[in-house]
């Protein structure tokens, strides 16, 4: 008579078998997480303050920083702070909100 086979095969346990390191588990992103991350990327703002140099000018009723090198105009979030430097070369330190091309001013000072 034949012996029935076990329902699940058993692997012999030996202590000599080395264990390989397992790669770290990365949690799966749900579609709502992906949409949130994409929205954050679209509304991205630089995480570190950057220095921008240029001339403060009035453009379409808004005080802006005009960069002569890149030919870019940046909106400034604090119009009253920037208004004091109208027509002057300045260095603005702040975080750039890329979607609206607006610099959130940390500091502003005239260039010598």
Image (cartoon, rainbow, N blue to C red):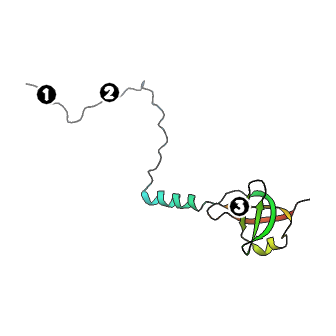
Question: Which numbered dot is residue 95?
Answer: 3
Q: Circle 2: is it few (<14), some (14-19), or many (20+) Cα within 10 Å? A: few
Which badge, 2 or 3, is on the more N-terminal residue? 2
Q: Is residue 17 left or right of residue 70?
A: left
Q: Is residue 107 left or right of residue 96?
A: right
The C terminus appears in which quarter of the rendering?
bottom right
Q: Nearer the viewer, residue 63 or 80?
A: 63
Tag 1, which secondary structure?
loop
Give the total of numbered labels.
Answer: 3
Q: Is residue 20 above or below residue 51?
A: above
Q: Residue at x 74, y 54 (%)?
A: 70
Q: In the rendering, at what x and y percent does residue 33 appear?
A: 47, 58
Q: Residue at x 80, y 72 (%)?
A: 81
Q: Circle 1: is it few (<14), some (14-19), or many (20+) Cα within 10 Å? A: few
Which badge, 1 or 3, is on the more N-terminal residue? 1
Q: In the rendering, at what x and y percent does residue 99 appear?
A: 61, 62
Q: Kindly identify which residue carries mark 1.
A: 3
Q: Residue at x 71, y 56 (%)?
A: 48
Question: Which numbered dot is residue 12?
Answer: 2
Question: Which numbered dot is residue 69?
Answer: none
Q: Nearer the viewer, mark 1 or mark 3?
A: 3
Q: In the rendering, at what x and y percent does residue 19 appear?
A: 45, 30
Q: Residue furthest left?
A: 1
């Amino acid at each position: 008579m034949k012996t029935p086979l076990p329902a699940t095969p058993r692997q012999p346990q030996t202590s000599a078998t080395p264990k390989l390191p397992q790669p770290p588990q990365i949690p799966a992103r749900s579609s709502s997480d992906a949409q949130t991350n994409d929205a954050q990327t679209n509304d991205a703002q630089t995480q570190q303050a950057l220095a921008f140099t240029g001339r403060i000018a009035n453009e379409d009723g808004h005080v802006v920083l005009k960069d002569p090198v890149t030919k870019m105009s940046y909106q400034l979030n604090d119009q009253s702070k920037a208004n004091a430097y109208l027509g002057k070369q300045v260095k603005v330190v702040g975080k750039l909100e890329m979607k609206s091309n607006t610099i959130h001013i940390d500091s502003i000072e005239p260039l010598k």
